[in-house]
Amino acid sequence: MYFQLVVLSGTPGTGKTTLARTLSGMMGVKWVGLSDLVRDKGLFLGVDAERGSLIADVERLIPKLGQLAEEAGGRLIVEGHYAEVTPREWVEKAIVLRTHPGELWRRLAERGWSEGKIRENVQAEILGVCAYNAVEAYGWEIVYEIDTSSKPPSESVREALEIVSRGGEKYRVGRINWLRQLEKEGKLEEYFK
Ligand SMILES: Nc1ncnc2c1ncn2[C@@H]1O[C@H](COP(=O)(O)OP(=O)(O)OP(=O)(O)O)[C@@H](O)[C@H]1O
Ligand SMILES: [Mg+2]
């Protein structure tokens, strides 16, 4: 069966689950969150004690994902901060969610996360780790980015629908650069001390 999956990736707190849920309803396409799948189906190798997170067993996760895509008729929205593990040949488009470091810090602090855990994730967002991983996995042609910093989730849904239906130069990966932005704001040091 031919798969056309939409991959939603991004640093924790950028809005993947929020977006996936609504996008799924509007597109009439099922969605799956990789972290939930890994936990619920026991698809992990162990626990990362330092981070308090599960270490996904990708070798078992991928066939499970294939099975879900098959059951869904070939269309599925896959979300997760390592969603680029989804094989290239199954992916139609990948969207990386991006959030300004200041806003991301606020969102993660609201979750009650430790400063160390927040800082690690915000630094990864500044350096564009998820965008890098998506481009490495899929090539820049099918990778897009949306900025969820200061607009309502409904606006992110609209942008994602535009990307899925038309693509759009406006959303091509590479336009969002927090390093440059923070340097301009004189705030880069705050995040790397
Ligand atoms: N434009 C937006 N799009 C999506 N979420 C937004 C947006 N603006 C604000 N938010 C808020 O950001 C938070 C994002 O949380 P969410 O759980 O969706 O992130 P996540 O990327 O799935 O995180 P995790 O990787 O930890 O599961 C929510 O509280 C959501 O309401
Ligand atoms: Mg989530």
Image (tube, rainbow, N blue to C red):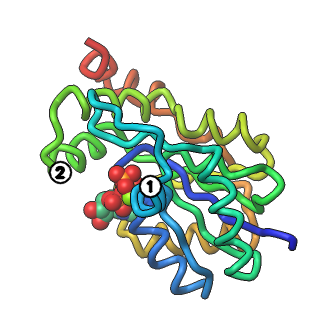
Q: In this view, does 186 lie to the left or right of 98?
A: left
Between 93 and 113, the one lying in front of the other is 113
Does residue 168 appear to the left or right of 180 in the view shown?
right
The residue tagged 1 is 42
Mark 2 → mark 1, Cα distance in angstroms = 25 Å
Q: Is mark 2 on a helix, strand or loop?
A: loop
Rendered image quadrant of residue 160: bottom right
Image quadrant holding the C terminus, namely top left
Most extreme residue toward the top, as rendered?
193
Q: Position of residue 24 (x, y in %)?
A: 54, 79
Instruction: Look at 54% across and 51% down and name the residue there.
Output: 9
Residue at x 42%, y 75% (from the top left corner): 154
Residue under the point 65% across and 44% down? 59
Position above or below: 145 against 55: below
- The residue type indicated by label 2 comes to Arg
Query: What residue is drawn where x is 43% and y is 35%?
Result: 125
**Mark 2 CB within 8 Å of ligand 1:** yes
- Three-letter amino acid code at disc 1? Gly
**Residue 182 sits above or below residue 91 on the image:** above
Question: Image quadrant of residue 176?
Answer: top right
Quadrant of the picture in which ligand 1 is shown: bottom left
| Residue located beneath label 2 in the image | 111
Proximity of marks 2 and 1: CB atoms separated by less than 8 Å: no
Crowd band around label 2 with a 10 angstrom C-alpha radius: few (<14), some (14–19), many (20+): few
Sequence-earlier tag: 2 or 1 = 1
x, y (%) of residue 167?
74, 63
